[in-house]
Amino acid sequence: MKFNIRGENLEVTGSIRDYVEKKISKLERYFDTPPTSEVHVNLSVYNDEQRIEVTIPMTNLLLRGEVQHVDLYAAIDLVVDKLERQIRKHKTKVNRKFKQNGAAKHVFAELEKEAASVALEEESDEIEIVRTKRFDLKPMDSEEAVLQMDMLGHAFYVFENAANGDTNVVYRRNDGKYGLIEPNA
């Protein structure tokens, strides 16, 4: 893995860099071949609160974790634990799905690539659209869409329902449960 470690209001010393690289490199054991993508790590300090954000973009998968803690080293440990849980949860889900479909080899990820394009537009004085995203919708079930949403750390996720071909949205409710939005027939 290649690392891109940045610090905000914090100097990234050699010992911090070594600790981050050592801990995050342990994630390689979950892959048949180590990810070739660059690992983005942002370390920051605000009001005596240490924050670490880790993003690992890979082909068909985006791993992301963010943790705030009073101790930087504890925050690093916690974010690695969070990323490990994401990987294990996703591997279990995907492997179970492929076993049910009769696949002989277990595949780690078959996720949607989100090709985003940014556009600035103004429609009127009151409503201003500042960003437009375009992406292909991959057919999936609502359970897989919730998994994708959680892995991306988003509050909602748009997908194509594999059962009927409709565009659906899953979202995280305030009570921690999930909701599904379907169009009327």
Image (spheres, rainbow, N blue to C red):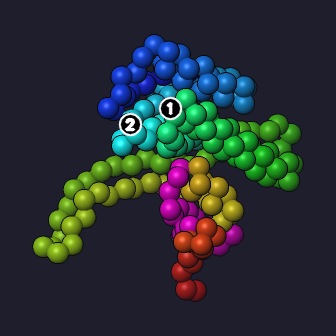
Kind of residue at disc 2: Val
Residue 114 among those drawn in magenta: no
> Which residue is identified by label 2?
45
**Residue placed farthest to the left in the image?**
125
Question: Which one is earlier in the sequence, the residue at label 1 or at label 2?
Answer: 2
The residue nearer to you, when weighing 139 against 60, is 60
Kind of residue at disc 1: Leu
Residue ID at (61%, 38%): 78
The residue nearer to you, when weighing 75 against 41, is 75
The answer to which quarter of the image holds residue 179 is bottom right
Q: Percent position (x, y) of residue 29?
A: 72, 25
Residue ID at (86%, 39%): 104
Question: Is the residue under label 2 in contact with that under label 1 (CB below 8 Å)?
Answer: yes
**How many labels were placed on the picture?**
2
Spatial CA distance of label 1 from label 2 is 9 Å
Left or right relative to 100: residue 77: left
Q: Percent position (x, y) of residue 116?
A: 39, 49
Q: Percent position (x, y) of residue 53?
A: 47, 38
> Which residue is identified by label 1?
72
Q: Secondary structure at mark 1?
A: helix
Residue ID at (20%, 61%): 121
**Residue placed farthest to the top in the image?**
14
**Vertical arrangement, residue 20 with respect to residue 102, above or below:** above
Left or right relative to 85: residue 106: right
Q: Percent position (x, y) of residue 47?
A: 36, 43
Q: Residues within 10 Å of mark 1 (few under 14, many from 20)?
A: some
**Residue placed farthest to the bottom in the image?**
185
- Visible residue check, residue 158: no
Quarter of the image with the N terminus in it: top right
Residue ID at (40%, 39%): 48
Left or right relative to 96: residue 78: left
